[in-house]
Amino acid sequence: MSESVNALYRARLATAAQAAALIPNGAKVAMSIGAGTPPALVTALAERARAGEARDIRFYYMLCAAVAGRTIFDPDLVDRLIPMSYFHGGVERALDKLRGPDQHLVDFIPSHFSQIPRSMVEHVGVDTLITIVSPMDEEGYVSLGTNTDYAMAVARKPGARLIFEVNAHMPRVRGDCRVHISDITALVENDQPLLAAPPAPLSDVDIRIGEIIAGLVEDGACLQMGIGALPDAVCAGLHNHRNLGIHTELMTPGLAELVRRGVVDNSRKQTHVGTSIFTFALGDRALYDFIDDNPQAEAYPVEYVNNPAVIARNDRVVSVNATTQIDFHGACNSEYVGGRQFSASGGQVDFVRGAYMSNGGKSIIACHSTAAKGTISRITPTLTGPVTTGRNETHLVVTEYGMADMKGKTLSERAKALIAIAHPDFREELEREAHAMQLLAR
């Protein structure tokens, strides 16, 4: 490593308090997803706000880590450090429970994941990026590691403040995810373990749905998996498949395990042959070790990875995403529960479109047939929240009771097919509702 590069690095080193002080009042800050949330920086920013030194700073992000909820998004600080969420998680849902009738403690910005970089840079005008990065390499580059996603677009914005937390635990990932030391505003060294997201326990229903979906996946298919127990169950059901590929927004432990087992070799892809492509990663330490300097795994910005036209360049793409509600027409609400924002659309629609555009591709929407301990049917006459995936987009729907193909079906045929995979306890009631809506002939 050259002395000039080392000198640039030393010149940018700061304490967390010094780095936080570089973010002025009124700033618009992009913050990385999950494992990329920088704990030292958000702690220092919260301390500045409590001391009355920081106000009117807005944070734009998806799915922040719990450390943000304990620091910058402390309920006592959200009038000064303002969350602007593109994807709700536990932190936002906890704040939402505290709000009054005329209050929004966390505001929400609807957007497809592929469009968030443009939303942040062009429409919002973010001016700062805070994230965790890997240690610098011999050429003077740090890697965005687990979080290329929208971070790279902000990092490339002319004049943006890049305030990074360097962490030896952050993997150095290959692909288009590096930032040179000369472009960085300040660096804070903080070597603490990255956020680990343990896998959700699999229920018998998850396993059954995973088996059904695994049966729809052909050898040689290219996979995208969403987050949660259902995609994990699908991965578990694919252990006897061969020559699978990966082109996914989220790299998960389940997908990494398929590579380790030799199930995924990316040999039949049409793009990035031999390599698993992703835009962010969230999981356990074994996952982070898997993507560290691994030529079989590369990260690219989300506007590339989630572009439906790019997704469709591979044949036989199989996209698996979860939903919370499906109406008789096949439209899906995948983000609203109990009258409130629960998560977001994320990349669901990006991959629903890209997978169906793919030669031989399949877009799969999966869900348990019921919610609230069996008291509510997820297949319903009408949605009680916004439409995430429209009825024209939905392809295959899977519950533990089977699969329904929406393509080429009339509204009447769709209602009948969906009722057939609803929980048996609700089918009679759903049929009555379908008759009342004149979707089923008497």
Image: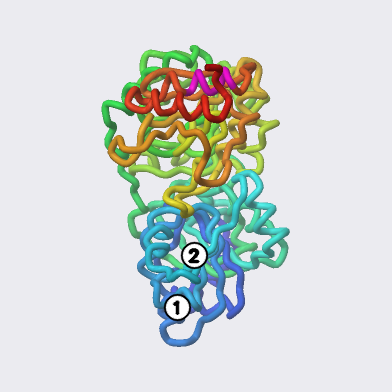
SS category of the residue bearing label 1: helix
Q: Is residue 167 above or below residue 298?
A: below
Residue toward you, 305 or 167:
305
Label 1 – label 2 distance at C-alpha: 25 Å
Disc 1 to disc 2: CB gap under 8 Å = no
Residue toward you, 332 or 116:
332
Judged left or right of residue 229, residue 388 is right
Measuring 34% from the left and 59% from the top, which residue is drawn there?
A: 192
Query: How crowded is the residue under tag 2: few (<14 C-alpha within 10 Å), some, or many (20+)?
Result: many
Residue toward you, 370 or 181:
370
Q: Which residues are magenta?
A: 412-418
Residue type pointed to by label 1: Ala
Q: Main secondary structure of the magenta part?
A: helix
Measuring 54% from the left and 20% from the top, which residue is drawn there?
A: 440
Which residue is under mark 2?
106
Which residue is under mark 1?
17
Q: Is residue 217 above or below residue 283?
A: above
Farthest residue, direction bottom? 52
